[in-house]
Image (spheres, rainbow, N blue to C red):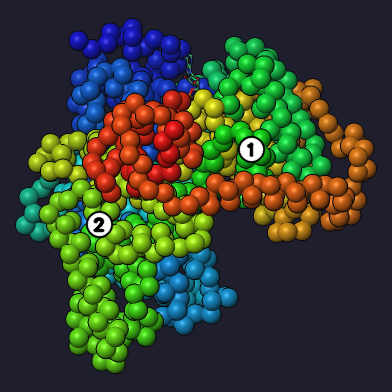
Amino acid sequence: RGPSREELLEGLNEPQRAAVVHEGAPLLVVAGAGSGKTRVLTRRIAWLISERRAHPGSILAITFTNKAAAEMKERVEDLVGKRARIMWVSTFHSACVRILRKEIDKFGFKSNFSIYDAADQKRLMALVAKDLDLDPKRYQPNALLHWVSNHKNELRDAEEATKDAHNKLEETYAAAYTLYQRRLTEANALDFDDLIMMTVHLFQQFPEVRETYRRRFRHVLVDEYQDTNHAQYALIHQLCADQMEEPVAAGDEPQERVEPAELMVVGDADQSIYAFRGANIRNILDFEQDFPNATSILLEQNYRSTQTILNAANSVIGHNKGRKPKRLWSEAGDGERIVGYVADDEHDEARFVSEEIDKLTDEGAHKAADVAVFYRTNAQSRVFEEVFIRTGQPYKVVGGVRFYERREVRDALAYLRMLVNPADQVSLRRILNTPKRGIGDRAVECVQALAERERLTFWEALRRADDAPGLATRSLTNIRGFVAMVEELQSMVDAGERADVVLESVLSRSGYLAELEASDDPQDETRVENLAELVAVAREFSDDPVAGPSADPSDVDAGQVAPGLSDFLERVALVADTDQIPDDDAGVVTLMTLHTAKGLEFPVVFLTGLEDGVFPHARALGDQPELEEERRLAYVGVTRARERLYISRAVVRSAWGAPSHNPGSRFLDELPIDLVDWRRTEASQTRWGRPDLSGSVRMGEPTAAGRRNFSSAALRADAASKAKPARAIPSLEPGDRVIHDSFGMGTVVALEGVAEKAVASIDFGSEGVKRLLLRYAPVEKL
Ligand code: ATP
Ligand code: MG
C-alpha cells in the first residue's frame, strides 16, 4: 500500500502543490533560494510514481551533484518504497555515462572507455602541445583546455572549430583541439565535456537511438536548471521537445513518432554561478520560448532563513541589473542580527570564526555540524585549518585537494584504468616507470616510434618491444617484465575478480607499496594509509554496489553479473566535491568554497574574506557581467544560512607571500546597515592603528612572530601524527578496545581474513563503524 494523496502533499503550500500535481505541458518553477524547489521536485517524483502510476524506470531526474542525487533517491524511497530504486536520479554526467556505455560503439569507441578528469586532461594536453611544438609560455595547457571546453559546451567539434578559425591564434587552438581529440580517441577515453556532447551527437545522428530513450523516459525533471550549459540544454531538448520530422534515409521505415516526455525544470536565475563553465542563464530566461505552451509557477515563500537573512540577500542581489525582481519572504521572524567583524589579518579572521564557533557550541545553541565556513577560493581554507588544528576543532574541507587527487591515489587508479583499458595511454604512461623499474625516457621514445610506424597503440607496441629498433637490452628486459606483470593482473580482471582484490594485487605485484613502506619519509606513511583507505573504498563498493549513485540496478537485473573493476572506476571518476560532506557527524565544522555550497543549507554560516579583490574576485572588479556573477555568488552564500549569518573581512591579507591591503567588499555596502551588528570595525582597531591605505602594509612584529610560532606548532603537530614507526598487524578479537589515529577510540565488532588480509570492523561511536585493513590502518590495541 502506497502513501495517501494527503501524505504526498503534506507540508506544501498552494503553488508548491500545483507544481507537484501538474500534468502535461512543460513546467518551469522559478523561485528564489530556499523556497522549496528541490522539495517540490522530489515530491513530484513520488507523486508520479504513486498517484499517476508512472513506472519508476520511466523517470529521469537530474541533480547537480551525486550526493544530491543520492539524497533525493533516498527521500523518494522513504515516500513510495523500494521500487523507486530503479529510477534514474543522477547528474548529467552520470546519466550520459550510462547511455554511452551502451551506445558508444556507434562512434567507434569501446564501451569500457576511460573518463579523464581535469588532471588527466592537462597531462594529455601538455603532450599535445609538445607534439605541436607550441611555445609553452604562449599556449598553456589550461588555456587550451578552457578553449576546447567552451567549444564542447557549445557542441562544436574539432572539425567545426577548424572551419571557424579566422586567424593564426585560432588555427593553433583548433589544431590543438584536433590532436587532443585524436589522442583521446586513441586512448579510448572521453573527458567530462565529451560525455554530454557525445550523447547529444548520438541522439542527433542516430534518431532511432534517441527514440528509444524518448520512449523510455516519460518524465524528465531537472534541478538547478539555471546552471545548465548549451550542451545540457540540447540534451533535454532532444528528449523533451517536439521533434521535427527527420529526413529519413531512403529505404528506412518511417519511425513512429514518440510523444515528448513531460518536463519539469526548477531554478533561480539569481543563483547562476557557473558561467565560467559555460552555464547559460538564458536557458532559464528563455524557457517559455524554447518550450511553447510551457507553464510557469512562481514560489515566493522562503522556508529556510530568517527575515533578516532574506532582507540582506534581497538587498544585495537587487544591485544586479536586468533581472526579474522578486521578493522573498519568510514566516520565521526577524531572528538574530547579522554579525560583522573586521579582522587585522586573515589569521585574526580565522581566530574570530573559531572563537564564535566555540561560543555557539558551549552555549549549546548549536553543534559544530550546524556550522559552515565559506570562502571564495580554495586556498583560503588553509588558515582556518591551521586554527582548527590548533584548537582541536574537528573540521572537514569539502573540495580543495581531494582524496582522489592525491598522487598515490591517482597512481593506483591509473594502474586500474590501464588494466581495464590498455589503450588508455595517459594512465599507462603514468605508471610505466612508477615505481622506478628502469624504463626511461629513451626507451619510451623507442616504443613510441614503433607505435607510430606500425600504427599500434602504445600498449601494443610495448608488447612487441622486441621489434623496436634502438632499445637497450636492459630496457627490453624491464619492459618484458612489466608486460608480464600487467598481463597477469589483466587475467584477474578478465576473470571478474573484485575491485578490492585486484587493487591489492596491483599494489603488491607492482612493488608500489613496498617502495613506500621502505621509505623513511613520514609523508610516505600517510600515502600508505591513503592507499589502505582506497582499498577500503573498493571493498565497500564490491560489497554493496547498489547503494551508490551511479549504480544501475536495472542493468544488474538485465543479466550483468557482479560489479567489476570498471564499475568501480566509473564510480570513482564521478565523485563530486560535495560528495565528501560527512553525514550526521555532529562534531565537525564544514569548510567549503561558495561555489560548492549551492543547494545546501546550514543553521550557521560564516561568510569570510569580504574584500574587493578577494570577493568579488580581482578578475571581476572592472567587468560588469563578471561582477554580477560574483554578486549572485554572494546571494547564494547569504541564502545558505538558516538562523545566523556572520560576515567578515581582513584589513591585511597575504597573497602570494606578500601582505596586501584590500578595501572592504562592495557587497558589504549593499547590505542595509541596520541589519548588521558590527562587533569590530576598522576604526575600532587600535592595536596597530589604521593601516596605510596607499598600498601594501608591513605587518607589525608581534603578529608576524605569533604567526611563525603558530604555524610551526601546527606543522609539528602534523609531523608528529605522521612520523609513527611502522607497526606489526595487531592481533584483535571482537570486543577489544582500540585507538585509531584519526577516528579515535573504538570497539572491534567483527573480524574477517587472516594475516595480511585481516580486516576489522570497528565501531568508532560518532564516527560510525569502519572496515579497516589492519595491515595498513593506524590502529593500536589498548
Ligand atoms: P535552493 O534555491 O537553495 O536550492 P530550494 O528552493 O531548492 O533552495 P529547498 O532546499 O527545497 O529550497 O527548501 C528549503 C528548506 O525549506 C528545506 O529545509 C525544506 O525542507 C523547507 N521547505 C520547503 N517547503 C516547505 C514547506 N512548504 N513547509 C515547510 N518547509 C518547507
Ligand atoms: Mg534546491
Residue found at x 22% / y 67%? 486
Is 326 placed above or below 51 here? below
Q: Disc 2 designates what residue?
A: 505
Which residue is pictured at 72% across the width and 50% down the height?
Answer: 613
Say the numbered circle drawn on residue 129: none
**Residue 384, visible in the rendered structure:** no
Given residues 713 and 457, the one toward you in this image is 713
Q: Secondary structure beneath disc 2?
A: helix
Residue displayed at 52% across by 36% down: 598
* 377, 266: nearer the viewer: 377
Residue 257 rendering spot, x and y as whole percentages? 16, 40
Left or right of 276 in this view: 327:
right
Q: Residue at coordinates 33% horizontally, 84% vertically from top-left?
A: 443
- The numbered mark, 2 or 1, whose residue comes first in the sequence reads 1
Name the image quarter holding the C terminus: top left
Does residue 236 lie above or below 161 as drawn? above
| Residue 385 seen from this side | yes
Q: Amino acid at mark 2?
A: Ser
Alpha carbon distance from label 2 to label 1:
38 Å
The picture places residue 553, in percent across and down from the top left corner, at 19, 35
Assign a secondary structure to mark 1: helix
Is the CB of mark 2 within 8 Å of ligand 2? no
Dot 1 beta carbon under 8 Å from ligand 1: no
Which residue type does callout 1 highlight?
Phe
Residue receiving disc 1: 388
Question: Up-down: is 356 above or below 213?
Answer: above
- Residue 41 location (% of width, % of height): 38, 25
Q: Where is 418 relative to 597, above or below?
A: below
